[in-house]
Amino acid sequence: MNAEKFQSMLAEKGITLSQRQMDQFDQYYHTLVEWNEKMNLTAITEKPDVYLKHFYDSITAAFYFDFNQPFKICDVGAGAGFPSIPIKIAFPELRVTIVDSLNKRISFLEHLAKTLELSNVSFIHDRAETFGKNPDHREQYDIVMARAVARMSVLSELCLPLVKPGGVFIAMKGVQGKEELEAGRKAIDVFGGKIAEVHSFKLPVEESERNILILKKQKPTPKQYPRKPGTPNKMPIE
């Protein structure tokens, strides 16, 4: 997928990118590749692949959820900024916080934000388990997002404590998404969530399956969650 195809396929979905936004994606690509030579950010470095599998794939969440408001978003384990930075470029009014456990990635994201001149973005070096206990962040976000971080039973414990009641958790998944959702039903309920929408589609060009899972936060998460770092992964609630 070249840049022009990226722009036109988003336009077909009602997402119009200006020349400045296209320039930001171009800078994003070059910055990603440059830093990737020094540290492992992504195995995907060819330009058409980055535009398809990182930029376009990240924005697919906006095909099923309207981001056209100054929502407070938290992206858990964003790595090189996916999905929240492409969504932020497309919807500049969003207020984005990214939490990641690796300080090197936070350094990259801080540099990226300066390079792209992004406002209302913050990057926090922390484990999701301890971040979810922080009163400054617990149940403070309209939207919490994660892309390919952990299976749903684990991911729900990391993300739902950050969603304010009435807000949403959007999980971006591959082919296993629906199976993970079934296995994670108990966990989702325990942490105060409810399955609201499930959207399946094929990523263009390569035709691989994607699933966008939208969970509504119905009630506050019990205080004991999330558990200590590492525990959700070792002992998931299933």
Image: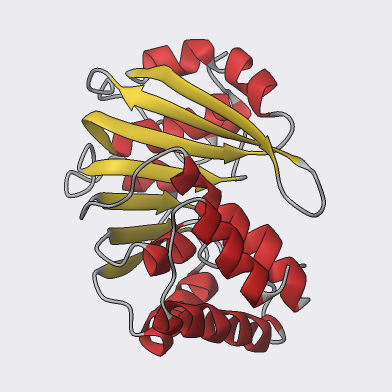
141 is higher (above) or lower (below) than 120: above
Q: Tell me: 83 left or right of 3.
A: left
> Percent from the top left, x then y, of residue 104?
53, 75
| Residue 226 sits in quarter | top left
Where's residue 42, x and y in %? 70, 68
Q: How is the image coloured?
A: secondary structure
Q: Residue furthest right?
A: 206
Is residue 42 shown to the viewer in this render?
A: no
**Quadrant into which the N terminus falls:** bottom right
Tell me: residue 45, above or below residue 237.
Answer: below
Residue depicted at x 37% and y 43%: 144
Depth check: give the residue in front, 226 or 112: 112
The residue located at (51%, 34%) in the rendering is 155
Q: Residue at x 23, y 40 (%)?
A: 138
Inspect this view and state whether residue 233 appears.
Answer: yes
59 left or right, relative to 140? right
Is 161 situated left or right of 39 in this image? left
Indicate whether 57 appears above or below 142: below
Label count reads 0
Q: x and y percent of residue 74 in the render?
A: 34, 51
Q: Position of residue 148 (x, y in %)?
A: 62, 45
- State the quadrant of the C terminus: top right
- Residue 107 vertical position relative to residue 206 in the rendered view, above or below: below
